[in-house]
Amino acid sequence: MGFEPPQRLVRALGETYGDTAAADWLGRLPALTDDALSAHSVSLDRVCAPGGRSSLVLLVRRADGSPAVLKIAPPGAAPALERAALAHWNGWGAVELLTAPDGAVPEEAVLLERLHHEMSLRSLPEAKALLEAAGTVRRLWVEPPAGHAFETVAERTAGQSEAMRAAAERDPELEPLVSAALAAREELVLDSPELLLLHGNFRQSKVLSGERAPWLAVGPEPLTGERAYDLARLVRDRVEDLVASPGGAATARRRVKKLADSLEVDQARLRGWTLFRAVESGTRALTAGRTQDGELSLEFAGWL
């Protein structure tokens, strides 16, 4: 099958895995796609563009004519863990995982119910979007399945911390924010109050309109830990609007309080994880050459 992968995906893969590894996987992508389409007995409608940053997203039809979505992801995106989380949620608050007719599951592929990919919570006014996001994410916070392979918040953030320290060494101006974020993390991981299954990358653009339910979460990067970690990325949503507004700093702090109160999460812990995740995102963006994205995240972090 011949096609050009969306440029958004090509750029993101290069940033995440390096140009050589990304080019190797992209070279194998047509064959992987053919195998996945065949294994799931689906036909291609079209490639979804701009699509995702971690996988190729295909709009497909099952043998009975019903619509579905097929995601093809590199091993680093951990598609097996995404399948495991979606299977555990079983459609509760999240997109439903579909199975191949013969039960075979190609390692790189995830078959999902089709949602309205063009309509996320970002299409709603901010107050309404945050309300719907809170209602969606609370459904995902359940006990993880027995014998699971998900990493913990402490494990994931430990690896991220090393990259943050390296960024601060290259640019000493980052050191104060990086030090504050790392200190917050060290305190938070000492006594995590709960160990729940988390989405891992929850934000407004990861909640899409559906037929089965008004709003369903997609694209998890699942791990286990406390709810405050999962909320922290949502706090930073629409950061470009916050930075452009004269009252952005006050609005950001109010958002922390509002989300903490509405979901019964400790406000100080939410603030700490929001700081860590904003600085981690900012330093990662700067390292990848996405200067504007990095500066927006770091300016937001400075308000906290």
Image (cartoon, rainbow, N blue to C red):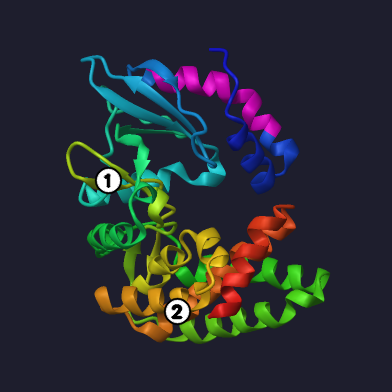
Identify the mark nearer the N-term, 2 or 1. 1
Q: Give percent across and percent down for residue 295.
A: 67, 64
Nearer to us of marks 2 and 1 is 2
Residue 40 appears in the rendering? no
Horizontal side of residue 131 vs 76, given as left or right: left
Image spot of residue 197 (x, y percent): 32, 62
Q: Residue at x 75, y 36 (%)?
A: 20
Taking the view exactly as shown, the residue that stands out farthest to the front is 246
Residue underneath mark 1: 87
Instruction: Report the disc number at residue 253.
Output: 2
Q: Quadrant of residue 142?
A: bottom left
In the rendered image, which quarter is residue 204 located in? bottom left
Q: Quadrant of residue 286?
A: bottom right
Residue closest to the eye, 21 or 132: 132
Residue type, label 1: Ala
Q: Which span of residues is magenta-colored?
A: 23-38
The answer to which of 95 and 40 lies nearer the viewer is 95
From the viewer's perspective, is residue 39 above or below residue 271?
above
